[in-house]
């Protein structure tokens, strides 16, 4: 099967585009996912990935680039969540649940007015084998923008992620950093739609980063490992998707989940066996 996959890569441009796009999505999702994990914002990633659906539907019906509509609705959702949380006594997770479910429902209704439901399936679950060169360039542009953002504001992201109170004491604009991260999180979620779909975007944002988190307590190494896990998961997932005619998003996410399970069990610092050994020693003492 590996030979069949390599042969396909040599012959078909669509498979080459799919592989490059998957690698870029895996790397950039792992990179920004590290900050999402550290800040406890996994639900926010889920919210934005679902909230972009009405923007995709509106762009589809108007014949515009889906990146524009999806980005606008993703940012709108992030703003609404922050507004509801600040102006009411509701907790953040409650506001997230209300906003993302409402946006997602609106998107499903809007997409039902479109001429074909085929695109809805691709939007929900991804179809990396249908990636066009324009999608590849867009994804690459988003990845470069995210990389520049992380490099320029690394210290601010580091301090505000671990200790927001101290970051405020230093005079950092914590709120602006937060919304900046939300903006780039939205871009990553939107650029990942074609690869893994809205339903599974959050898995690519969270799972590789969570895997890396179990293996190291250093942020830079965590970011590197997270991106590596995202890239390897994308390559292996695409291989199974193409070779066995499976849904691309699902195979990529499941591959990423396998890496997490292995890290959860065998991590030298935080693995299941390590913690179990400590419990046994404690009980014996």
Image (spheres, rainbow, N blue to C red):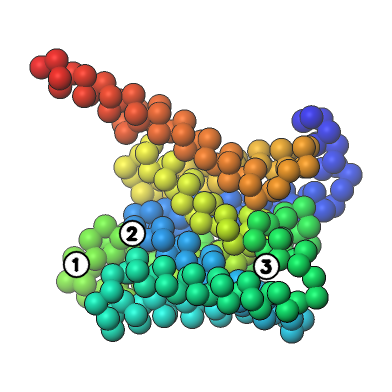
Separation (CA) of disc 1 from disc 3: 36 Å
160 horizontally vs 75: left or right: left
Q: Is residue 101 visible?
A: yes
Q: Nearer the viewer, residue 107 or 267?
A: 107
Q: Secondary structure at mark 2?
A: loop
Q: Earlier in the sequence, mark 2 or mark 3?
A: 2
Query: What is the distance, in whole Å, between disc 2 and disc 3 at their CAs?
Result: 27 Å
Position of the C terminus, as image quadrant, is: top left
> Which mark is on residue 138?
3
Q: What residue do we see at 44% from left, 48% from top?
A: 209
Picture quadrant of residue 166: bottom left
Q: Residue at x 78, y 57 (%)?
A: 130
Q: Give the secondary structure at mark 3.
A: helix
The residue beneath circle 2 is: 39
Residue beneath disc 1: 165
Where residue 219 is drawn, which disc sits there?
none
Q: Is residue 201 above or below residue 232?
A: below
Quadrant where the image shows the N terminus: top right
Q: Please report whichever mark, 1 or 3, sits nearer to the chain's N-terminal start.
A: 3
Quadrant in the picture for residue 10: top right
Q: Helix, strand or loop at disc 1?
A: helix
- Single out the residue that lies furthest toward the left: 285
Give percent across and percent down for residue 38.
34, 54
The residue lying at 52 percent from left, 48 percent from top is 227
Q: Does residue 65 lie above or below 49 as drawn?
A: below
Give the farthest residue toward the right.
11
CA neighbours of label 1 inside 10 A, class few (<14), some (14 to 19), many (20+): some
Mark with earlier residue (2, 1): 2
- The crowd level at tag 3 (other Cα within 10 Å; few <14, some 14-19, many 20+) is some
Q: Tell me what residue is drawn at x 38 percent, y 61 percent.
A: 41
Q: Report x, y in % for residue 219.
A: 36, 49
Badges 1 and 3: C-beta atoms under 8 Å apart?
no
């Amino acid at each position: 099967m590996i030979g069949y996959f390599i042969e396909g890569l040599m012959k078909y441009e669509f498979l080459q585009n799919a592989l490059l796009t998957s690698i870029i999505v895996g790397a950039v999702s792992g990179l920004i996912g590290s900050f999402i994990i550290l800040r406890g914002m996994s639900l926010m990633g889920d919210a934005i990935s679902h909230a972009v659906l009405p923007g995709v539907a509106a762009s589809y019906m108007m014949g515009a680039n889906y990146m524009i509509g999806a980005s606008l609705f993703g940012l709108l959702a992030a703003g609404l969540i922050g507004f509801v949380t600040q102006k009411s006594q509701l907790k953040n997770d409650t506001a997230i649940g209300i906003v993302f479910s409402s946006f997602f429902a609106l998107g499903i209704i809007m997409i039902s007015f479109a001429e074909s439901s085929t695109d809805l399936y691709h939007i929900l679950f991804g179809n990396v084998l249908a990636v066009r060169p324009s999608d590849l360039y867009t994804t690459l542009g988003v990845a470069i923008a995210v990389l520049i953002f992380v490099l320029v504001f690394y210290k601010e992201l580091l301090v505000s992620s671990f200790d927001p109170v101290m970051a405020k004491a230093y005079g950092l604009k914590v709120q602006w950093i937060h919304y900046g991260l939300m903006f780039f999180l939205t871009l990553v979620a939107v650029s990942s739609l074609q690869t893994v779909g809205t339903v599974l975007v959050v898995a690519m944002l969270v799972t590789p980063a969570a895997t890396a988190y179990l293996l190291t307590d250093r942020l830079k190494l965590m970011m590197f490992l997270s991106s590596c896990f995202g890239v390897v998961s994308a390559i292996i997932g695409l291989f199974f998707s193409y070779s066995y005619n499976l849904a691309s998003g699902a195979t990529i996410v499941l591959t990423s989940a396998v890496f997490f399970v292995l890290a959860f069990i065998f991590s030298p610092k935080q693995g299941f066996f390590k913690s179990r050994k400590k419990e046994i020693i404690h009980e014996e003492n």
